[in-house]
Amino acid sequence: MTETFLPTQESLYLDRKWHHLDADGQVLGRLATRAAVLLKGKHKRQFTPSLDCGDFVVVTNARKIRVTGNKAVSKFYFRHSGYADGARVVTFRQQMDKDPRKVVYLAVKRMLDDNRHRSRQMRRLRIYPGAEHPHPTGAFEAAL
């Protein structure tokens, strides 16, 4: 009889690594997919969907991200306050001028499953508009 191996939360916590993704010249969707895989932990041998086994991800140079095709002018971000006439639409360019971190944040968030792990996984994502960040520099580049 075979038994399924389930890692403990403590071992998952101790196994967390720091990954650095440089967004300079990267396509938004491809970068978001790579970050989502690392946050979820799908790159690990002991990946278990019911446990939060992902790593920390640091994204730098969010200001230099790019999109393909005509998305720079046609892509928009929609939100609604819940009140009548409360709809707000912001184009991709406007959002990049205002806060490029939010563009990357929303792309990664929407790549993750909408479940109870997502908020914890998103807390391990750090996004910086420039190249400087205060996190461990000994972490290796994520090569997926």
Image (tube, grey):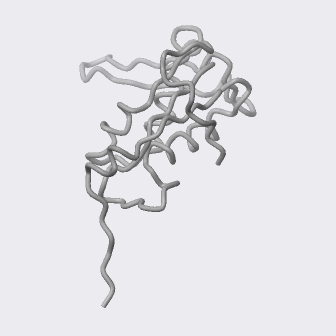
Coordinates of residue 108 in the picture (x, y in percent): 49, 36
* Residue 63 shown left or right of residue 79 in the figure: right
* Residue 47 shown left or right of residue 50 in the figure: right
Residue situated furthest bottom in the rendering: 1
Residue drawn 52% across the image and 54% down it: 43
Say if 115 sits above or below 78 in the image. below
Quarter of the rendering containing residue 69: top right
For the residue pair 113 and 16, the one nearer the viewer reads as: 16
For the residue pair 110 and 52, the one nearer the viewer reads as: 52
Residue situated furthest top in the rendering: 98
Residue drawn 53% across the image and 16% down it: 133
For the residue pair 73 and 28, the one nearer the viewer reads as: 28
Q: How many marks?
A: 0
Coordinates of residue 89 in the picture (x, y in percent): 47, 19
* Residue 15 shown left or right of residue 77 in the figure: left
* Residue 99 shown left or right of residue 47 in the figure: right
Residue drawn 65% across the image and 27% down it: 22
Residue drawn 46% across the image and 40% down it: 17
Coordinates of residue 106 in the picture (x, y in percent): 46, 30
Quarter of the figure that contains the N terminus: bottom left
Coordinates of residue 35 in the picture (x, y in percent): 53, 39
Quarter of the rendering containing residue 91: top right
Say if 92 sits above or below 26 in the image. above
